[in-house]
Image: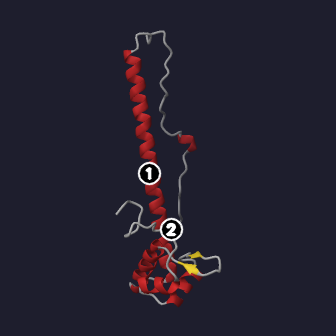
Amino acid sequence: MTRGRGPYGADPDAAVFVISVAAELSGLHPQTLRTYERLGLISPGRTGGGGRRYSQRDIELLRVISELTSAGIGIEGVRRILDLENRVTALAQRNEELQAELEATRDALRQALAQRRTDPRAGAAAPNRLPVLRGPDPGSSLVVWRRQR
């Protein structure tokens, strides 16, 4: 199975399942799927004629919603959990991007420093061409505070 693909090599975001198949795969009633869509928990694709089409990722989301509601969590709780999970995923991806950018910057600085050390023209009179890394400016810091209830 390739990364980013479904169990059969298909795109997990491809909206291919009609509502009856999606209901069967998720173990939910078709009316429940319509209700979840109306509540904004899921957004299936649409055909030209307006028919709903669910993706493998939609089926997985429906199963998660089903597990959460079966555990006694209300719809608003489910919505909040899904929102927080999406935020965690987005922040983790952004963190990976920033880590890669930081490592690339460090590599560039190491190379520039190594080149400066081996360059015979880089005597005392040569200007410093290395960027200066500074910490955050304390005057531009933001403090988040929430009143205790």
Which sits earlier in the primary sequence, circle 2 or circle 1?
1
* Between marks 2 and 1 in the image, the one whose residue lies nearer the viewer: 1
Q: Residue at x 43, y 40 (%)?
A: 102
Q: Residue at x 57, y 41 (%)?
A: 139
Q: Is residue 127 above or below residue 41?
A: above
Q: CA distance from mark 2 to mark 1?
A: 29 Å
Q: Nearer the viewer, residue 37 or 24?
A: 24
Residue designated by label 2: 148
Q: Residue at x 41, y 18 (%)?
A: 116
Q: Residue furthest left?
A: 1
Q: Residue at x 52, y 73 (%)?
A: 15
Residue designated by label 1: 95
Q: Nearer the viewer, residue 27 or 145?
A: 27
Q: Name the spot of residue 51 as percent of width and height, x first.
A: 60, 81
Q: Residue furthest right?
A: 49
Characterize the local packing of mark 2: few (<14), some (14-19) or many (20 or more) Cα atoms within 10 angstroms. Answer: few
Q: Secondary structure at mark 2?
A: loop
Return the mark for residue 123: none
For the N terminus, the image quarter is bottom left
State the count of labels: 2
Q: Residue type at mark 1: give it.
A: Asn
Q: Name the spot of residue 76 as percent of width and height, x first.
A: 52, 79
Q: Residue type at mark 2: give it.
A: Gln
Q: Nearer the viewer, residue 63 or 73?
A: 63
Q: Secondary structure at mark 1?
A: helix
Q: Is residue 24 above or below residue 102?
A: below
Q: Name the spot of residue 136 as percent of width and height, x first.
A: 50, 40
Q: Are marks 2 and 1 in contact (CB under 8 Å)?
A: no
Q: Name the spot of residue 81 as percent of width and height, x first.
A: 46, 73
Q: Is residue 99 above or below residue 16?
A: above
